[in-house]
Image (tube, helix red, strand yellow):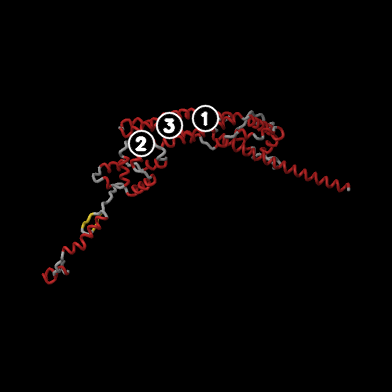
Amino acid sequence: MQGSLWEDAQKQGNQARAPDIDLSELESLFSTAVATNASEKGGTKRGSAISKPEIVHLVDMRRANNCEIMLTKIKMPLPDMINAILALDTSVLDNDQVENLIKFCPTKEEIEMLKNYNGNKEMLGKCEQFFLELMKVPRVESKLRVFAFRITFSTQVEELRTNLTTINDATKEVKESLKLRQIMQTILTLGNALNQGTARGSAVGFRLDSLLKLSDTRARNNKMTLMHYLCKLLSEKLPELLDFDKDLIHLEAASKIQLKLLAEEMQAINKGLEKVEQELAASVNDGAISVGFREALKSFLDAAEAEVRSLISLYSEVGRNADSLAQYFGEDPARCPFEQVTSILVIFVNMFKKSRDENARTAELEKKKLEKDKEKATLSAKKVLE
Protein backbone atom coordinates (compact mmCIF):
# COMPACT_ATOMS: atom_id res chain seq x y z
CA MET A 1 0.00 0.00 0.00
CA GLN A 2 3.00 2.26 0.40
CA GLY A 3 2.70 5.37 -1.78
CA SER A 4 -0.77 4.39 -3.02
CA LEU A 5 -4.09 6.14 -2.66
CA TRP A 6 -5.04 3.51 -0.08
CA GLU A 7 -2.22 4.64 2.18
CA ASP A 8 -3.30 8.26 1.75
CA ALA A 9 -6.88 7.33 2.56
CA GLN A 10 -5.73 5.80 5.84
CA LYS A 11 -3.81 8.93 6.78
CA GLN A 12 -6.58 11.34 5.87
CA GLY A 13 -9.09 9.56 8.08
CA ASN A 14 -12.67 10.65 7.40
CA GLN A 15 -11.78 13.19 4.68
CA ALA A 16 -11.69 10.58 1.91
CA ARG A 17 -14.03 8.02 3.33
CA ALA A 18 -16.66 6.45 1.04
CA PRO A 19 -20.33 7.46 1.35
CA ASP A 20 -22.76 5.31 3.32
CA ILE A 21 -24.22 2.51 1.16
CA ASP A 22 -27.80 1.27 1.36
CA LEU A 23 -27.07 -2.46 1.61
CA SER A 24 -30.67 -3.51 1.06
CA GLU A 25 -30.82 -1.54 -2.17
CA LEU A 26 -27.50 -3.00 -3.31
CA GLU A 27 -28.60 -6.54 -2.61
CA SER A 28 -31.93 -6.06 -4.36
CA LEU A 29 -30.19 -4.73 -7.43
CA PHE A 30 -27.23 -7.08 -7.68
CA SER A 31 -27.00 -9.94 -5.19
CA THR A 32 -30.23 -11.68 -6.20
CA ALA A 33 -29.40 -11.53 -9.90
CA VAL A 34 -25.98 -13.10 -9.34
CA ALA A 35 -27.49 -15.90 -7.25
CA THR A 36 -30.18 -16.62 -9.86
CA ASN A 37 -27.62 -16.66 -12.68
CA ALA A 38 -25.45 -19.10 -10.77
CA SER A 39 -28.35 -21.41 -9.97
CA GLU A 40 -29.46 -21.48 -13.62
CA LYS A 41 -26.02 -22.70 -14.69
CA GLY A 42 -25.93 -25.25 -11.93
CA GLY A 43 -22.65 -23.84 -10.61
CA THR A 44 -21.54 -22.77 -7.16
CA LYS A 45 -20.89 -19.15 -6.26
CA ARG A 46 -17.57 -18.13 -4.92
CA GLY A 47 -17.89 -14.33 -4.87
CA SER A 48 -18.81 -13.59 -8.48
CA ALA A 49 -16.91 -16.58 -9.99
CA ILE A 50 -18.43 -20.00 -10.86
CA SER A 51 -16.16 -23.02 -10.33
CA LYS A 52 -16.68 -26.26 -12.31
CA PRO A 53 -15.58 -29.70 -11.06
CA GLU A 54 -12.43 -30.79 -12.88
CA ILE A 55 -12.08 -34.19 -14.59
CA VAL A 56 -9.25 -36.24 -13.12
CA HIS A 57 -6.83 -37.80 -15.63
CA LEU A 58 -4.46 -40.51 -14.41
CA VAL A 59 -3.55 -42.15 -17.73
CA ASP A 60 -1.03 -40.65 -20.15
CA MET A 61 -2.97 -38.00 -22.11
CA ARG A 62 -2.02 -39.28 -25.56
CA ARG A 63 -3.05 -42.83 -24.73
CA ALA A 64 -6.21 -41.57 -23.04
CA ASN A 65 -7.16 -39.50 -26.11
CA ASN A 66 -6.60 -42.45 -28.46
CA CYS A 67 -8.64 -44.64 -26.15
CA GLU A 68 -11.53 -42.18 -26.17
CA ILE A 69 -11.42 -42.00 -29.98
CA MET A 70 -11.60 -45.80 -30.13
CA LEU A 71 -14.59 -45.84 -27.77
CA THR A 72 -16.50 -43.32 -29.90
CA LYS A 73 -16.22 -45.75 -32.85
CA ILE A 74 -17.76 -48.61 -30.86
CA LYS A 75 -20.68 -46.46 -29.74
CA MET A 76 -22.21 -48.45 -26.90
CA PRO A 77 -22.39 -48.14 -23.12
CA LEU A 78 -19.48 -49.75 -21.30
CA PRO A 79 -21.64 -52.33 -19.44
CA ASP A 80 -23.16 -53.47 -22.76
CA MET A 81 -19.66 -53.82 -24.21
CA ILE A 82 -18.57 -56.00 -21.30
CA ASN A 83 -21.67 -58.17 -21.69
CA ALA A 84 -20.94 -58.66 -25.39
CA ILE A 85 -17.36 -59.70 -24.58
CA LEU A 86 -18.47 -62.21 -21.94
CA ALA A 87 -21.12 -63.63 -24.29
CA LEU A 88 -18.63 -63.84 -27.21
CA ASP A 89 -21.33 -62.07 -29.20
CA THR A 90 -20.01 -61.64 -32.75
CA SER A 91 -23.19 -59.80 -33.79
CA VAL A 92 -22.30 -56.89 -31.48
CA LEU A 93 -18.51 -56.64 -31.79
CA ASP A 94 -16.44 -57.38 -34.90
CA ASN A 95 -12.77 -58.37 -35.10
CA ASP A 96 -11.44 -54.84 -35.64
CA GLN A 97 -13.28 -53.58 -32.57
CA VAL A 98 -12.05 -56.46 -30.43
CA GLU A 99 -8.46 -55.97 -31.63
CA ASN A 100 -8.71 -52.28 -30.66
CA LEU A 101 -10.04 -53.21 -27.24
CA ILE A 102 -7.02 -55.50 -26.78
CA LYS A 103 -4.69 -52.58 -27.59
CA PHE A 104 -6.34 -50.50 -24.87
CA CYS A 105 -6.42 -53.05 -22.08
CA PRO A 106 -4.92 -51.42 -18.96
CA THR A 107 -1.30 -52.28 -18.21
CA LYS A 108 -0.16 -53.53 -14.79
CA GLU A 109 1.04 -50.01 -13.94
CA GLU A 110 -2.28 -48.45 -14.94
CA ILE A 111 -4.21 -51.04 -12.93
CA GLU A 112 -2.13 -50.30 -9.82
CA MET A 113 -2.55 -46.57 -10.34
CA LEU A 114 -6.34 -46.89 -10.53
CA LYS A 115 -6.44 -49.22 -7.53
CA ASN A 116 -4.49 -46.72 -5.46
CA TYR A 117 -6.72 -43.80 -6.45
CA ASN A 118 -8.81 -42.80 -3.41
CA GLY A 119 -10.67 -39.84 -4.93
CA ASN A 120 -14.15 -39.64 -6.41
CA LYS A 121 -14.12 -42.21 -9.23
CA GLU A 122 -17.02 -40.48 -10.96
CA MET A 123 -14.67 -37.58 -11.64
CA LEU A 124 -12.23 -39.76 -13.60
CA GLY A 125 -11.88 -39.36 -17.37
CA LYS A 126 -13.55 -41.61 -19.98
CA CYS A 127 -10.41 -43.68 -20.48
CA GLU A 128 -10.04 -44.26 -16.75
CA GLN A 129 -13.74 -45.18 -16.50
CA PHE A 130 -13.25 -47.66 -19.36
CA PHE A 131 -10.23 -49.21 -17.62
CA LEU A 132 -12.20 -49.55 -14.37
CA GLU A 133 -14.96 -51.37 -16.26
CA LEU A 134 -12.47 -53.77 -17.85
CA MET A 135 -10.85 -54.39 -14.47
CA LYS A 136 -14.11 -55.93 -13.24
CA VAL A 137 -13.49 -58.88 -15.60
CA PRO A 138 -10.78 -61.37 -14.52
CA ARG A 139 -8.02 -61.73 -17.20
CA VAL A 140 -9.96 -59.47 -19.55
CA GLU A 141 -7.12 -59.31 -22.11
CA SER A 142 -6.98 -63.10 -22.31
CA LYS A 143 -10.75 -63.22 -22.81
CA LEU A 144 -10.55 -60.60 -25.57
CA ARG A 145 -7.82 -62.57 -27.37
CA VAL A 146 -9.97 -65.69 -27.15
CA PHE A 147 -12.88 -63.63 -28.52
CA ALA A 148 -10.73 -62.41 -31.45
CA PHE A 149 -9.74 -66.02 -32.22
CA ARG A 150 -13.40 -67.05 -32.05
CA ILE A 151 -14.33 -64.37 -34.61
CA THR A 152 -11.60 -65.23 -37.15
CA PHE A 153 -11.57 -69.02 -36.60
CA SER A 154 -14.05 -69.98 -39.33
CA THR A 155 -12.36 -67.79 -41.93
CA GLN A 156 -8.90 -69.04 -40.99
CA VAL A 157 -9.97 -72.68 -41.18
CA GLU A 158 -11.83 -72.20 -44.46
CA GLU A 159 -8.91 -70.42 -46.14
CA LEU A 160 -6.43 -73.05 -44.97
CA ARG A 161 -8.72 -75.88 -46.05
CA THR A 162 -9.17 -74.28 -49.49
CA ASN A 163 -5.40 -73.97 -50.00
CA LEU A 164 -4.77 -77.53 -48.83
CA THR A 165 -7.47 -78.86 -51.15
CA THR A 166 -6.02 -76.88 -54.06
CA ILE A 167 -2.63 -78.53 -53.52
CA ASN A 168 -4.24 -81.97 -53.35
CA ASP A 169 -6.25 -81.33 -56.51
CA ALA A 170 -3.25 -79.98 -58.42
CA THR A 171 -1.06 -82.92 -57.40
CA LYS A 172 -3.73 -85.42 -58.44
CA GLU A 173 -4.31 -83.68 -61.79
CA VAL A 174 -0.61 -83.66 -62.69
CA LYS A 175 -0.03 -87.30 -61.74
CA GLU A 176 -3.20 -88.54 -63.44
CA SER A 177 -2.79 -86.57 -66.70
CA LEU A 178 -2.04 -89.12 -69.44
CA LYS A 179 -1.55 -86.26 -71.89
CA LEU A 180 1.22 -84.71 -69.79
CA ARG A 181 2.83 -88.12 -69.38
CA GLN A 182 2.88 -88.61 -73.19
CA ILE A 183 4.32 -85.13 -73.72
CA MET A 184 7.09 -85.80 -71.20
CA GLN A 185 7.89 -89.06 -73.02
CA THR A 186 7.93 -87.20 -76.35
CA ILE A 187 10.37 -84.62 -74.94
CA LEU A 188 12.63 -87.43 -73.72
CA THR A 189 12.54 -89.02 -77.17
CA LEU A 190 13.43 -85.66 -78.78
CA GLY A 191 16.31 -85.20 -76.36
CA ASN A 192 17.72 -88.65 -77.03
CA ALA A 193 17.39 -88.11 -80.78
CA LEU A 194 19.31 -84.82 -80.58
CA ASN A 195 22.00 -86.41 -78.39
CA GLN A 196 22.26 -89.59 -80.47
CA GLY A 197 25.79 -90.94 -80.52
CA THR A 198 26.71 -89.33 -77.20
CA ALA A 199 26.61 -90.55 -73.62
CA ARG A 200 23.41 -88.57 -73.13
CA GLY A 201 21.68 -90.18 -76.09
CA SER A 202 20.14 -93.04 -74.17
CA ALA A 203 18.65 -91.26 -71.16
CA VAL A 204 15.73 -92.85 -69.35
CA GLY A 205 14.56 -89.52 -67.94
CA PHE A 206 15.50 -85.87 -67.51
CA ARG A 207 15.62 -83.21 -64.82
CA LEU A 208 12.40 -81.26 -64.46
CA ASP A 209 14.12 -77.90 -64.98
CA SER A 210 15.18 -79.11 -68.45
CA LEU A 211 11.64 -78.21 -69.53
CA LEU A 212 12.63 -74.55 -69.24
CA LYS A 213 15.43 -75.01 -71.81
CA LEU A 214 13.10 -76.02 -74.64
CA SER A 215 12.43 -72.39 -75.52
CA ASP A 216 16.15 -71.53 -75.37
CA THR A 217 17.22 -74.19 -77.89
CA ARG A 218 16.84 -72.65 -81.35
CA ALA A 219 16.91 -74.21 -84.80
CA ARG A 220 19.81 -73.48 -87.23
CA ASN A 221 17.64 -71.10 -89.23
CA ASN A 222 16.81 -69.33 -85.97
CA LYS A 223 13.12 -69.30 -86.93
CA MET A 224 11.86 -71.74 -84.34
CA THR A 225 12.76 -73.16 -80.94
CA LEU A 226 12.66 -76.76 -79.80
CA MET A 227 9.39 -75.88 -78.04
CA HIS A 228 7.91 -74.79 -81.38
CA TYR A 229 9.11 -78.04 -82.92
CA LEU A 230 7.56 -80.06 -80.08
CA CYS A 231 4.21 -78.35 -80.66
CA LYS A 232 4.53 -78.89 -84.43
CA LEU A 233 5.33 -82.57 -83.95
CA LEU A 234 2.39 -83.09 -81.60
CA SER A 235 0.08 -81.14 -83.91
CA GLU A 236 0.95 -83.51 -86.77
CA LYS A 237 1.20 -86.81 -84.87
CA LEU A 238 -0.79 -86.45 -81.62
CA PRO A 239 -3.03 -83.36 -81.90
CA GLU A 240 -5.20 -84.57 -79.02
CA LEU A 241 -2.32 -83.73 -76.65
CA LEU A 242 -2.17 -80.02 -77.54
CA ASP A 243 -4.77 -79.07 -74.92
CA PHE A 244 -3.10 -81.01 -72.07
CA ASP A 245 -3.19 -77.81 -69.96
CA LYS A 246 -6.95 -78.33 -69.54
CA ASP A 247 -6.12 -81.33 -67.36
CA LEU A 248 -4.22 -79.09 -64.94
CA ILE A 249 -7.02 -76.81 -63.70
CA HIS A 250 -5.56 -76.15 -60.22
CA LEU A 251 -1.86 -76.03 -61.12
CA GLU A 252 -1.48 -72.25 -61.37
CA ALA A 253 -3.38 -71.61 -58.13
CA ALA A 254 -1.28 -74.25 -56.35
CA SER A 255 1.96 -72.68 -57.61
CA LYS A 256 1.14 -69.51 -55.64
CA ILE A 257 0.84 -71.39 -52.34
CA GLN A 258 3.83 -71.81 -50.03
CA LEU A 259 3.83 -74.85 -47.77
CA LYS A 260 5.80 -72.93 -45.14
CA LEU A 261 2.99 -70.40 -44.79
CA LEU A 262 0.41 -73.18 -44.54
CA ALA A 263 2.47 -74.73 -41.73
CA GLU A 264 2.49 -71.37 -39.91
CA GLU A 265 -1.28 -71.03 -40.32
CA MET A 266 -1.82 -74.56 -39.02
CA GLN A 267 0.40 -73.78 -36.04
CA ALA A 268 -1.46 -70.53 -35.34
CA ILE A 269 -4.81 -72.35 -35.27
CA ASN A 270 -3.44 -75.00 -32.91
CA LYS A 271 -1.98 -72.35 -30.59
CA GLY A 272 -5.23 -70.41 -30.64
CA LEU A 273 -7.12 -73.52 -29.63
CA GLU A 274 -4.67 -74.11 -26.77
CA LYS A 275 -5.31 -70.55 -25.52
CA VAL A 276 -9.04 -71.23 -25.59
CA GLU A 277 -8.57 -74.38 -23.51
CA GLN A 278 -6.36 -72.53 -21.01
CA GLU A 279 -8.82 -69.66 -20.58
CA LEU A 280 -11.72 -72.07 -20.21
CA ALA A 281 -9.88 -73.87 -17.41
CA ALA A 282 -8.81 -70.63 -15.71
CA SER A 283 -12.33 -69.11 -15.81
CA VAL A 284 -13.68 -71.85 -13.53
CA ASN A 285 -12.53 -69.75 -10.57
CA ASP A 286 -13.92 -66.43 -11.89
CA GLY A 287 -17.24 -66.73 -10.16
CA ALA A 288 -20.64 -65.60 -11.44
CA ILE A 289 -19.28 -63.02 -13.87
CA SER A 290 -17.87 -65.73 -16.19
CA VAL A 291 -20.72 -68.29 -16.13
CA GLY A 292 -22.14 -67.19 -19.49
CA PHE A 293 -18.64 -66.78 -20.89
CA ARG A 294 -17.70 -70.37 -19.98
CA GLU A 295 -20.86 -71.76 -21.60
CA ALA A 296 -20.28 -69.84 -24.84
CA LEU A 297 -16.58 -70.76 -24.92
CA LYS A 298 -17.25 -74.46 -24.23
CA SER A 299 -19.77 -74.59 -27.07
CA PHE A 300 -17.27 -72.98 -29.46
CA LEU A 301 -14.42 -75.24 -28.32
CA ASP A 302 -16.39 -78.46 -28.92
CA ALA A 303 -17.16 -77.47 -32.52
CA ALA A 304 -13.67 -76.04 -33.16
CA GLU A 305 -11.84 -79.16 -31.95
CA ALA A 306 -13.77 -81.34 -34.41
CA GLU A 307 -12.91 -79.02 -37.29
CA VAL A 308 -9.24 -78.86 -36.35
CA ARG A 309 -8.97 -82.66 -36.14
CA SER A 310 -10.29 -82.87 -39.70
CA LEU A 311 -7.92 -80.11 -40.79
CA ILE A 312 -4.87 -81.81 -39.25
CA SER A 313 -5.70 -85.00 -41.14
CA LEU A 314 -5.97 -83.07 -44.42
CA TYR A 315 -2.74 -81.20 -43.68
CA SER A 316 -0.82 -84.45 -43.16
CA GLU A 317 -2.23 -85.86 -46.41
CA VAL A 318 -1.18 -82.75 -48.32
CA GLY A 319 2.36 -83.00 -46.96
CA ARG A 320 2.67 -86.53 -48.33
CA ASN A 321 1.13 -85.59 -51.69
CA ALA A 322 3.37 -82.55 -52.09
CA ASP A 323 6.46 -84.73 -51.66
CA SER A 324 5.06 -87.36 -54.01
CA LEU A 325 4.77 -84.76 -56.80
CA ALA A 326 8.54 -84.22 -56.87
CA GLN A 327 9.11 -87.97 -56.69
CA TYR A 328 6.72 -88.47 -59.63
CA PHE A 329 9.21 -86.58 -61.80
CA GLY A 330 12.17 -88.44 -60.30
CA GLU A 331 13.22 -85.49 -58.13
CA ASP A 332 14.24 -85.37 -54.47
CA PRO A 333 11.60 -83.37 -52.50
CA ALA A 334 14.38 -81.93 -50.33
CA ARG A 335 16.22 -80.49 -53.36
CA CYS A 336 13.20 -79.79 -55.55
CA PRO A 337 10.31 -78.91 -53.21
CA PHE A 338 6.65 -78.62 -54.16
CA GLU A 339 6.86 -74.87 -54.85
CA GLN A 340 9.71 -75.36 -57.33
CA VAL A 341 7.95 -78.25 -59.11
CA THR A 342 4.72 -76.31 -59.62
CA SER A 343 6.58 -73.15 -60.65
CA ILE A 344 8.48 -75.04 -63.38
CA LEU A 345 5.32 -76.75 -64.59
CA VAL A 346 3.39 -73.47 -64.81
CA ILE A 347 6.19 -71.83 -66.81
CA PHE A 348 6.36 -74.88 -69.11
CA VAL A 349 2.60 -74.85 -69.68
CA ASN A 350 2.65 -71.14 -70.54
CA MET A 351 5.63 -71.53 -72.91
CA PHE A 352 3.95 -74.51 -74.56
CA LYS A 353 0.69 -72.60 -75.09
CA LYS A 354 2.55 -69.60 -76.48
CA SER A 355 4.52 -71.73 -78.97
CA ARG A 356 1.37 -73.68 -79.89
CA ASP A 357 -0.51 -70.46 -80.62
CA GLU A 358 2.42 -68.98 -82.55
CA ASN A 359 2.60 -72.12 -84.67
CA ALA A 360 -1.13 -71.85 -85.36
CA ARG A 361 -0.78 -68.19 -86.44
CA THR A 362 2.21 -69.02 -88.65
CA ALA A 363 0.30 -71.90 -90.27
CA GLU A 364 -2.69 -69.61 -90.86
CA LEU A 365 -0.49 -66.98 -92.52
CA GLU A 366 1.15 -69.61 -94.73
CA LYS A 367 -2.28 -70.95 -95.66
CA LYS A 368 -3.48 -67.46 -96.68
CA LYS A 369 -0.27 -66.89 -98.63
CA LEU A 370 -0.76 -70.17 -100.52
CA GLU A 371 -4.35 -69.21 -101.29
CA LYS A 372 -3.25 -65.83 -102.62
CA ASP A 373 -0.50 -67.46 -104.70
CA LYS A 374 -3.05 -69.93 -106.03
CA GLU A 375 -5.42 -67.08 -106.94
CA LYS A 376 -2.63 -65.21 -108.72
CA ALA A 377 -1.67 -68.38 -110.63
CA THR A 378 -5.31 -68.91 -111.65
CA LEU A 379 -5.65 -65.31 -112.87
CA SER A 380 -2.41 -65.59 -114.82
CA ALA A 381 -3.60 -68.82 -116.46
CA LYS A 382 -6.90 -67.16 -117.52
CA LYS A 383 -5.05 -64.23 -119.08
CA VAL A 384 -2.85 -66.61 -121.08
CA LEU A 385 -5.92 -68.46 -122.36
CA GLU A 386 -7.61 -65.25 -123.34
Image height of 335 relative to 6, above or below: above
Q: Secondary structure at mark 2?
A: helix
Would you say 305 lies left or right of 365 here? left
**Residue 326 pos. (x, y %):** 56, 30
Q: Position of residue 60 (x, y in %)?
A: 32, 48
Q: Secondary structure at mark 3?
A: helix
Label located before the other in sequence (1 or 2)? 2
Hey, which residue is sitting farthest right in the picture? Answer: 386
Q: Residues within 10 Å of mark 2 (few under 14, many from 20)?
A: many
Is disc 1 in contact with disc 2, using a CB cutoff of under 8 Å?
A: no
Identify the residue under disc 1. Answer: 318
Q: Name the residue type under label 1.
A: Val
10 Å crowding of disc 1: few (<14), some (14-19), many (20+): many
Looking at the image, which is closer to me, 144 or 235? 144
| Residue 199 seen in the current view | no
Q: Quadrant of residue 75?
A: top left
**Rendered residue at 26%/53% (across/down):** 42
In primary-sequence order, the first of circles 3 and 2 is 2
Q: Position of residue 77 (x, y in %)?
A: 34, 43
Q: Which mark is residue 270?
A: 3
The image quadrant of residue 21 is bottom left
Per the model, the C-alpha gap separating discs 1 and 3 is 17 Å
Number of labelled discs? Answer: 3
Name the amino acid type tagged 2: Leu
Look at label 3 and name its amino acid.
Answer: Asn
- Along the line of sight, which residue is nearer the eye, 205 or 67? 67
Task: Give the residue pinned by disc 2.
Answer: 86
